[in-house]
Amino acid sequence: MGTRRDDITAAVRMQIGIAMLTPNRIWGEATRLAREHGVSRQTVYDLAVKTKALLLRELIPAPHGPQPKATRILVDRNRLLRSTLALTAAGVSQRHVHGCIAEMLDTAVSPSWVNDRLAELEGRAAQVNQRERPAVGEGLAGDELFAYGRPHLLVVGNDSLFIYALTPQPKRDGQTWGRVLQDLPPTPQFASDGSTGLAAGLLAAGLDNQQLDWDHLLRPLWQHDAQLEQQAYAALEAVEERGRLFEQAHTEKRLAQHLARWERLQSQAEEAINRYDRFHPLARSVDAEFAMIEVTNGALRDPETSSRRLKSLGEQIKALPGRACDVLGTTLVNWARGLVSYLPRLAQALAPLAEAWGQAAIRALSRIWQVEAEVKRGHLAVSQRYSLEQIWHASLDEAAQLLGEHLFVVWDALSAILGRIWRGSMAAECVGSLLRPLLDGRKHSDQGSSELFRFLHNTHRFARGKRAGYAPAELTGITLPADRFTLLGLAPKV
């Protein structure tokens, strides 16, 4: 009788083995099992031996807690290419990729092999980037990056964080950036900082809808405010210290010296306090113009009125002593119109909601949104918080009365619009901070490496946040495969 029976399933073989291993097995069990399954008695005993060995091996106590599962992988050329690409995407330096591969995969590749393969992948990435055609017309943000002594222009979608352009150029003048910007898709808004080269490029490309970045104004504004406050407190501490020294003196000459120095320090402290007291209210007024909604009535700010207020505040700051105030005031005067250029586009985006649900309801919800935005910024006094809390409750009651059961639906739609990036180039700044370590990890910077970084960013799915589960390319309407590396001609993992 044959000993090989492929038609006997693993479950049946297990039952035979367990029956043979039972301590109370009756006499003649092996003969009965052999006859029942059409195998030899030796086969039955062999199955018992294999079952026992399997049970002993699998029932050995394992270490406590979760343990990584041992996996065997096939290290072939495709695996090495995927590893090289993944390490590059993670920011591993080009000169260190071969060392990481040798440690992780026990396979030696030369630095030249890594460089050559990356060059091939860069060419394929450029082809993929050229084919991608976003299906949305979102606002864009641009920023200049500098690496290896060369300027790079980065253009990012405000809503999707999709990189529309990343290119190194020998110059950063208007003609150079204008050629790059002309190839961008039509956009309702282009946000950037106040760099002269990029501004000239926008003019050369015919983009007159530039939105200047508020962060580049508010950051130095509040830094100078904090510096003036520190100087005032330091001057007061110096006066207090001199007063203590005066009290400890006993001789007439020492008393006279301390008194003269105290009077001089007192004068300096009064001057420092005066500088801060003059600057701080102006800084608060400029910061108040950052709000998109008038909290008093829920209306969208008027761009002309807000621009005039900003220019007036800029002139007042410019009149204060000190070079910092002169620079801040001049910047504010020159940027006033560009800082509020988003308001007409925001009004256009809100118009359908106001038409569908009524102007009064949208204004009530807008007040709620603006109050919550002000509280999140965390720069309010107790009295201001109390006042805003009263406005929040009154606005909620009004919105609930006007919208009824549709309140949360309209709130979600309004929050989605107001929550978009309207007032600056923060999206480009954010993506630029992600690209910086990648650029620094290369031996040099060229268009090929920029195209590869652009591909890796656009196809990487966000792990958290409001974009979680989606890649920037998918947020612009581009369909991506489950394995993004297959777009570069690499085979799936096996």
Image (tube, rainbow, N blue to C red):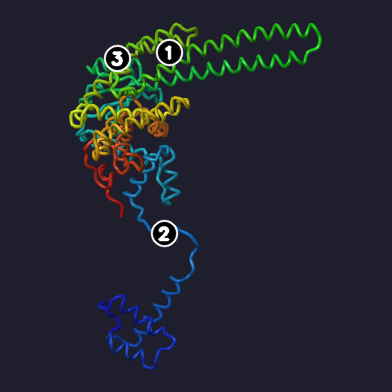
For residue 448, side relative to residue 105 (left or right)? left
Q: Nearer the viewer, residue 242 or 57?
A: 242
Q: Of marks 3 and 2, which one's residue comes earlier in the chain?
A: 2
Q: Residue at x 33, y 45 (%)?
A: 81
Residue 318 at what x, y percent from top left? 43, 8
Which residue is under mark 3? 200
Q: Is residue 258 above or below residue 378?
A: above
- Taking depth in this image into account, of 362 and 373 the one nearest to the observer is 362
Quadrant containing the C terminus in the rendered view: bottom left
Residue that numbered label 2 is attached to: 69
Position of residue 410 measured from the top left corner of the image (x, y, whole percent): 25, 35
Which SS class for mark 2? loop
Tell me which corner region of the image, top left, top right, bottom left or bottom right, holds residue 315. Answer: top left
Residue drawn 31% across and 39% down? 467
The Cα atoms of the two marked residues, 2 and 1, are separated by 59 Å
Amino acid type at circle 1 is Leu
How many marks the image carries: the answer is 3
Badge 3 amino acid: Ala
What is the distance, in whole Å, between disc 3 and disc 2 at their CAs?
Answer: 57 Å
